[in-house]
Amino acid sequence: MEGQGRIFTEVDPDLLRGCFRSKSKKLTNKVTSVKEAVQIHLHDGDYLAVGGFGGVRIPTALLHEIVRQGRKGLGFAGHPATHDCEILAAGKCFDRCDAAYIIGLEARGIPKMTRKYFESGAVECTEWTNAALSWRLRAAAMGVSFIPARSMLGTDTELHSAAKEIICPFTGKKYLALPALFPDVAIIHVHEADINGNCHIRGILVSDQDLARASKRVIISAERLVPIDFFRDDQEKTTIPYYLVDAVVEVPFGSYPGNMPYEYYSDEEHLQEWLTAEESPETYQAFLDKYLFGIRDFDAYLELCGGTHRMSQLRDLEYLRKPEGEGAD
């Protein structure tokens, strides 16, 4: 048996080795602006994967810029995609999606206009579980065309996926072959990065290390740029190595209104404001014109949402949520 869904990316690692081999290993300054990073590295029709998880550590500044630059025809990995999906749907940026968890903002509710975008038929979906999408990235990072798993066997998710049932040559047991996922572009928000592209992520990594290794191009946004010695003095801080990265952008509060672990809590009031705006096409368009299309950049967005005062409040909220004695090293 095989799933009825479509595979949206090339799965043969030998066809992609040339791309990875051609990446320079030189230590060069990769710092740029949000605008230039998107202009240079993301093109209409590319397959895009977003780091973080749900509303946690998402690269909001880069997502906003993708919408403002009018990127269209993108593929999109919904793994799981909550507010990041909501942002890209606002710009109708993608027309195909590997869907694990999409549309919903978890306990916050369902954004109606985002849901209508999918229900309209404008987006072709192939279904997976969150684990399956993680393992597809792991296969790509390993340089193999598929990875075996038992997850999804016998379910409707298997039926609507693009996986294929196989028989283990060692045991005769049935497995699902999950095709490797090689995104054209990954956008990942991190805590610290240096000018060369070395990155440090504090807290849960989800699949971002595999994502960086699986993607042809990687754009990093960072809360702060740090000296090169930050990584040279302690190599264990290197979550993502420089040679995987194509562009680095310093964006304080770059995950807002999402949660950035150890930095600031999610702005639940603003996320609810967005949800409420999606109740009707009129309120939705007015909201997008105010917060997305009618402003010049992400700094202007932060100012609209309360500026330094609101960001300070969210820092305090994140600090209060930490277990006693836990620091932000």
Image (spheres, rainbow, N blue to C red):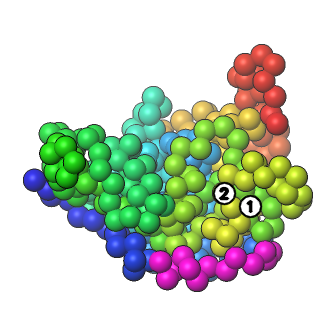
Up/down of 39 relative to 77, above or below: below
Q: x, y percentage for residue 308? A: 83, 43
Up/down of 255 relative to 31, above or below: above
Q: Which residues are magenta?
A: 17-29
Residue extending furthest top? Answer: 324
For the C terminus, the image quarter is top right
Q: Secondary structure at mark 2?
A: loop
Q: x, y percentage for residue 17? A: 47, 77
Closer-to-camera residue (186/110): 186
What residue does disc 1 label? 198
Whether the magenta-drawn stretch holds residue 151 is answered as no
Q: Amino acid at mark 1?
A: Asn
In the picture, residue 278 is in which quadrant? Answer: top left
Left or right, residue 56 beside residue 134: right
Closer-to-camera residue (271/59): 59
Circle on res. 240: 2
Which residue sits at x=16%, y=51%?
A: 167
Q: Are marks 2 and 1 in contact (CB under 8 Å)?
A: yes
Q: x, y percentage for residue 206? A: 54, 44
Q: Residues within 10 Å of mark 2 (few under 14, many from 20)?
A: many
